[in-house]
Image (cartoon, rainbow, N blue to C red):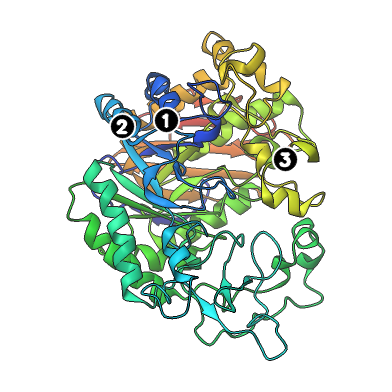
Amino acid sequence: MAERSAMQGQTQPSDWSEGGVIYQIYPRSFCDSNGDGVGDLNGITEKLDYIASLGVDAVWISPFFKSPMKDFGYDVADYCDVDPIFGTLADFDRMLAAMHERGLKLLIDLVPCHTSDEHPWFQESRSDRSNPKADWYVWRDAKPDGSPPNNWRAHFGGPSWTWDGRRAQYYLHHFLPGQPNLNYRNPAVTEAMLAQAEFWFQRGVDGLRIDAIATLAYDPELTDNPARDLDDPFRQSAAARANPFHLQHHRHSFNQHDEVVAFLTRLRALADRYEGRFLLGEVGGDGMAVSAQYTAGEDRLQSCYNFSLLGAPISGRVVKDIVTAVLAEVGAGKLTFAVGNHDVMRVTSRWAAEASPAQQQTLAKTALTLLMTLPGKACVYQGEELGLTQADLPYELLQDPEGINGWPHAKGRDGCRTPMPWRDNAGGGFSVGESWLPLPEEHLAAAVNRQEDAADSVLRYTRQALALRKERPELRRGCTELLNAPDELFVILRKEGDSQVLGIFNLSPQAQTFALPGNRWSEPLLASEAAVANGVVTLPAFSCSLLENVK
């Protein structure tokens, strides 16, 4: 029998979020109801029956707030209003009511670390050095030679400081110059941000996904960040060639965790005043220790969403190490796993770049099954249920500032943000107008209408996988054991009482076999492409199989 390791049970409360599945919508690209080429809230409402049919518990919608759209909504000019391209507050209310009618919960983004430079708070703050909001943002004088206060670099290129002639000072921004950082050392800023969150709680939203938490606080001494060692292999990566941000260790520019925890504690206290509200925090990088800190106890976040499975390369050993760290450091119920989102290459292209189209479709099913088998919560990004691949867009069609600045070494995020293909016709059923990003021809072949009727489609498989997670308490809340296996395989056992579900995942481009442990096992409950005979599971490239014990 295979040896077992890293056993731990889950202790999360029994509610919708216990092992729940969240569906992420990037609203610009989901469904356009008015023909302007940009998705909107009414388009989401039109597709709620489809979303509910997937079997998800909740929906997370990326920002739809009023914004100049320099970073497509993550530069907020008004936290309490809907940008006209997405609709109105009345449209939002109708959408939320329609979700609740279908038993769906709604999470929206809170972007607490920075605003748009067009936000009234910043317009007042930059007007002079003595106005009531003068220190709501991070302002510093130039060095004697006129250079910025320190060497910090911004995520999207260039220094983290921009000169403002009105105040004759630099202001801090970790992303674009149009996204100035708020100063949480001023208590008034915390109170103002909590008021924005409460506005949406009072409107009925069920939770918040808190964006880029680590950038909320900085070293008050403005200490220079250390450089990566000259022999660090990462210095030769495409990311480092595209953006010198990656040549530093960002030890002082963010990750000041005590101050972040103080804010999260206040936010949790606010959320707890409204029954059933859920807080999900984004932690950049792998962030296991940080995720553990931000979810510790009962007065911080209920769950963290980190980037542990959002990179490449992947292998069974990598996944095992990640899950082992979660069980040991964070706790099985306090992480929300994802294999994709609006910021990273689609999983089919990221984990199986050299695979055939058929193998990529198998991987799409396997990645979804993996999410449904891991402990904690799961987040599915729109289009993963269709097995969409990364779109390869030419430079002249890029919209994303990260891709425009990083080309050609980093092509940015537009390739995972192209419109959802609803129908296999011109426009893909997304819009009757010209869409803000092109819809790739190859995505039309994966359109929803084609997959609804195809017996072996990724969409129909997704519904089966989500239904199985909902039906099986082992998968939703059970204890977790990781079984030893070759590095190409990830093998996980989920247990609830005497019931067990065994998941075997081949994350390699070669066929693999696995000898089942001594218990009696059923025929596969679910398999992307695998066979069982004489106690051995044979798994083709990028495939998986779930089996249950026979008592």
Q: Quadrant of the C terminus?
A: top left
Task: Kindly report the distance in space between the C-alpha atoms of the residues bearing marks 2 and 1.
Answer: 10 Å
Q: Identify the element where label 1 is drawn.
A: helix
Label placed on residue 41? 1
| Quadrant in which residue 175 is drawn | bottom right
Amino acid on which disc 1 is placed = Leu
Residue at 81% in and 61% down: 241
Q: Position of residue 506 (x, y in %)?
A: 63, 38
Which of label 3 and label 2 is nearer to you?
Answer: 2
Q: Are marks 2 and 1 in contact (CB under 8 Å)?
A: no
Residue at 32% in and 55% down: 196
- Res 376 seen here: no
Query: In the image shown, does 371 or 400 lie closer to the viewer?
Result: 400
Query: In the image shown, does 32 or 465 lie closer to the viewer?
Result: 32
| Quadrant in which residue 258 is drawn | bottom left
| 445 versus 487 height, above or below | above
- Residue pointed to by mark 3: 398
Q: Position of residue 534 (x, y in %)?
A: 57, 26
- Residue pointed to by mark 2: 90
Q: Identify the element where label 3 is drawn.
A: loop
Report crowding for label 2: few under 14, some 14 to 19, many 20 or more residues within 10 A (C-alpha). Answer: few
Task: Kindly report the distance in space between the C-alpha atoms of the residues bearing marks 3 and 1.
Answer: 24 Å
| Quadrant in which residue 172 is drawn | bottom right
Q: Please report whichever mark, 3 or 1, sits nearer to the chain's N-terminal start.
A: 1
| 300 versus 9 height, above or below | below
Residue at 57% in and 36% down: 367
Task: Kindly report the distance in space between the C-alpha atoms of the residues bearing marks 3 and 2.
Answer: 32 Å
Q: Position of residue 284 (x, y in %)?
A: 54, 60
